[in-house]
Image: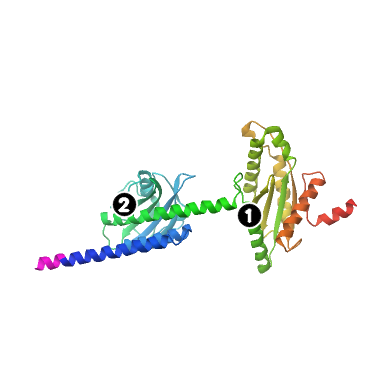
Amino acid sequence: MKALKKENRELRNILKEVKKELSIFINVGKALTSTLELNKVLDIIMENVQKLVKAEAWSLLLIDEERDDLYFAMTKGHQPAGLQELRLKIGEGIAGKVAKMGKPLIIRDVLNDRSCPYYLTAIKGFTPNNVLSVPIINKKKTIGVLEIINKKNGKPFTKKDMELMLKLADQASIAIERSNLYQKMANLAITDDLTKLFNLRYLYRALDTEVKRCRRYHSTFSVIFLDLDSFKLVNDRHGHLIGSKTLMEVAGMLVSSLRDVDIITRYGGDEFVIVLPHTTVEMAYGIAERIQQDINRHTFLTEEGLSLRITASFGVAGYPDHSRDETELLRLADQAMYMAKSLGKNRVILASELLHISCRGR
């Protein structure tokens, strides 16, 4: 009878644990389907890692397909400063090895393991003893790694812990894929297919945002409208494929010469619009002149065996100097650009010069 009671007690405890785990996974599933934002998805995953396996530190790494390496998308617990700037090669360290093999790993003596990553030893007051690392796999392709360090009870990770993390990783893989797909679709809606710059739809949204910000904080911003001079000749002489590659090269120049906060858009054809937050008209004029000179000095399509030289005409308008309305501001920058064309091309004209030049022309 004692043995039977003990067995019943153990079965009840197991059933209780299974019900708890099932409840967590049901809640995880509901939570993950409630959002498409990657950061929220990652938060949900990390929160439930802690519920399933009590540990001292957790990391979720994702694979950057362009760079073919791992980056720390989210970390919790004892972690060294600057960990989120660190990147691991596929095959490097424990997480890198798991990403390469696509199979989970339990390391029970971390410091004596050759694959122990150096960053684990850089945490003051924290000794990594054991690590559980599982791959996040979607459609037979590893997209990330869940890594947890040191169980709080001091015991090594078990096969049961691994199975729980693999179940969570399965749910995570679907949610991360949905989130990435959503982000790609969102990017397609606001970016130009050819140049990968923002498109016209995003431009109007950005202008509206900047006007509201400036009204609220009594700030300023400027708009540069630029059009490549005689670009039709490039298409006529060399074909539209070369013309497209030239536009892509111009887009690359703009991205490399401007700040991250600046909004660069392809307006259409060979026209580009740049929105410069916290930038006075005078500053914007200087930026436009610098871009003009860069284009003048640049030899395009050398890799294609060509040596094309092109120029551009620029119009500059600013808030609140020229207008407090986003539509009017864009129109004035456009008019200033066309004035630059009419005066011989390859120059920068301020919106405030429009009236002065028109009167002088009469």
Rounded to the nearest angstrom, the CA distance separating label 2 from label 1 is 52 Å
Identify which residue is drawn at 59% across, 46% down: 193
Residue reaching furthest to the right:
362
Dot 2 lies on which element?
Answer: helix
Identify which residue is drawn at 31% across, 52% down: 110
Residue 93 visible to the viewer? yes
| 191 relative position to 17: left or right | right
Residue 245 is covered by the magenta coloring: no
The answer to whether residue 26 is above or below residue 251 is below
Q: Quadrant of residue 203?
A: bottom right
| 193 relative position to 148: left or right | right
| 156 relative position to 194: left or right | left
The residue that label 1 is drawn on is 201
Residue 218, position as x, y percentages in the image: 69, 67
Residue 110 tag number: 2
Residue 6 is covered by the magenta coloring: yes
Q: Earlier in the sequence, mark 2 or mark 1?
A: 2
Secondary structure mostly taken by the magenta-highlighted segment of the chain: helix
Residue reaching furthest to the left:
1
Identify which residue is drawn at 64% across, 39% down: 244
Q: Quadrant of residue 5?
A: bottom left
Residue bounds of the magenta highlight: 1-7
Q: Quadrant of residue 194?
A: top right
Residue flagged by tag 1: what amino acid is it? Arg
Dot 1 lies on which element?
Answer: helix
Identify which residue is drawn at 89% across, 53% down: 360
